[in-house]
């Protein structure tokens, strides 16, 4: 028996709306004030990436047709002749075993697996993106057979080093597989087994299955991190002009990749390190896309060139404070939803967490400074570690001072905390 999907967390704190600094207080002299907060540091070692347990040998002399399919608007192909596919003669254990054995003895499967893993490397696909690639591949090979598509995808994933279980459900009379993940996911049914948590990701309404392990010793769970940009083909949005109110030269005409946004829109939400409080770390650590680097960064770099760290940070802070329109997630999406950097640049509105994620990325990429996130009840801000003395509210961590920078406190300078923030209940999320 499986477990019901975990509902997304509900934050009961009232949402903190933006506050604007009165004009007569924008240039006030700041004093140093240390803030005392709980600090949540990341785990030392990231989860290892699933890799083929046995080397996949290419068969270059084998003459094969190419099979084409699409992943988030990106044309992909693998060497595979679908006319040579084996036929699944049933859904019982013996029929499944026969089909699995036939796949394992096909030379052309070596090249399909080799090409799939090469696509993974060439496109810089994270584990979830590779899962979606195998799904698109299998559905394109078996467009009319749910059982064969599921079994084929499970085979490809196991050969690529992913840990999973194959199952049959008496509820819908179909084959399915459940895949191990490094952390808990929201909104997907799951099974808690001896080796961890396994999730059913195909959208089926199934809560019980007869299962068998089909993976190899040394296989690993799917990771939910995105360590580098997933390189999908461009499908660019219309240009959007973004300009700081105070610093008119801090401006950019940005375009975003709609294929990448489709990918982000399907990405599952997870409980990172079994602590739902730190989910914003995941979003903040996702790299900006090449479109951000091409359309946004050059103008910002030119604007802050020759400025001190403090001056440059103030300019970027005002850009995020004033170039974007604010609206709460509840009003727009009917619930909490954090944005990746590229999403904040596309959608017409963003909230405090989206702005803090964006600002943290800009400061790290453009100024090379460390940033942490600060979560107050109902509000998210940032703090920056400067290499020069800076005055204002700060947090001490590992012998260094991180000065508060609030992207939703409109026209606030570096070092200014939004009024009425409860520091006693706040905590710091180290990126």
Image (cartoon, helix red, strand yellow):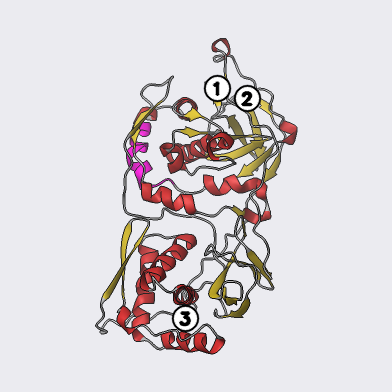
Relative side of 148 to 414, left or right: left
From the top left corner, tell me how far across and down residue 383 is, in percent. Answer: 58, 34
The numbered disc on residue 412 is 1
Q: Is residue 339 magenta?
A: no
- Residue that label 2 marks: 418
Cβ atoms at labels 2 and 3 below 8 Å apart: no
Is disc 1 in contact with disc 2, using a CB cutoff of under 8 Å? Answer: yes
Extreme-right residue of the structure: 424
Left or right: 5, with 93 as reference point: right
Span shown in magenta:
288-301
Task: Specify whether residue 297 is painted magenta.
Answer: yes
Query: Which residue lies at the image location 44% right of the left edge and 54% below the top edge?
Result: 228
Say what secondary structure mark 3 lies in. Answer: loop
Q: CA distance from mark 2 to mark 3?
A: 55 Å
Tags 1 and 3 touching, CB below 8 Å: no
What is the CA distance from the residue labelled 1 to the residue labelled 3?
A: 56 Å
Which residue corresponds to mark 3? 54
**Few, some or many residues within 10 Å of mark 2 (<14, 14–19, 20+):** many
């Amino acid at each position: 028996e499986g477990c019901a999907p975990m509902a997304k967390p509900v934050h009961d704190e009232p949402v903190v709306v933006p506050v604007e600094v009165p004009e007569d207080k924008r240039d006030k002299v700041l004093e140093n004030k240390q803030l005392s907060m709980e600090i949540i540091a990341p785990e030392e070692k990231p989860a290892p990436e699933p890799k083929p347990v046995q080397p996949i040998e290419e068969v270059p002399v084998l003459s094969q047709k190419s099979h084409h399919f699409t992943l988030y608007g990106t044309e992909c192909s693998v060497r595979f002749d679908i006319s040579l596919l084996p036929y699944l003669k049933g859904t019982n254990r013996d029929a499944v075993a026969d089909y699995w054995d036939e796949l394992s003895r096909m030379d052309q499967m070596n090249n399909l697996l080799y090409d799939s893993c090469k696509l993974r490397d060439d496109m810089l696909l994270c584990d979830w993106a590779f899962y979606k690639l195998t799904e698109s591949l299998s559905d394109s090979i078996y467009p009319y057979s749910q059982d064969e598509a599921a079994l084929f995808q499970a085979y490809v994933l196991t050969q690529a080093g992913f840990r999973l279980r194959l199952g049959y459900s008496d509820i819908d009379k179909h084959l399915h597989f459940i895949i191990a993940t490094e952390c808990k996911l929201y909104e997907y049914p799951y099974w808690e087994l001896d080796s961890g948590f396994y999730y059913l990701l195909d959208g089926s309404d199934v809560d019980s299955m007869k299962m068998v392990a089909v993976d190899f010793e040394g296989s690993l769970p799917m990771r939910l991190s995105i360590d580098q940009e997933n390189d999908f083909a461009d499908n660019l949005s219309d240009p959007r002009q973004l300009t700081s109110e105070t610093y008119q030269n801090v401006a950019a005409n940005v375009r975003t990749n709609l294929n990448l946004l489709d990918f982000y829109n399907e990405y599952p939400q997870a409980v990172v390190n079994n602590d739902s409080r730190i989910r914003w770390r995941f979003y903040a650590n996702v790299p900006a896309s090449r479109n951000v680097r091409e359309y946004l960064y050059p103008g910002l770099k030119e604007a802050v060139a020759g400025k001190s760290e403090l001056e440059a940070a103030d300019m970027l802070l005002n850009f995020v404070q004033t170039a974007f329109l604010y609206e709460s997630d509840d009003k727009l999406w009917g619930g909490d939803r954090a944005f990746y950097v590229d999403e904040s640049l596309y959608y017409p509105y963003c909230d405090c967490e989206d702005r803090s994620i964006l600002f943290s990325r800009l400061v790290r990429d453009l100024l090379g400074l460390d940033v942490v996130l600060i979560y107050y009840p109902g509000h998210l801000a940032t703090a920056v570690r400067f290499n020069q003395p800076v005055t204002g509210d700060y947090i001490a961590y590992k012998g260094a001072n991180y000065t508060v920078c609030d992207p939703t406190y409109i026209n606030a300078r570096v070092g200014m905390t939004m009024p009425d923030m409860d520091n006693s209940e706040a905590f710091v999320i180290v990126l």
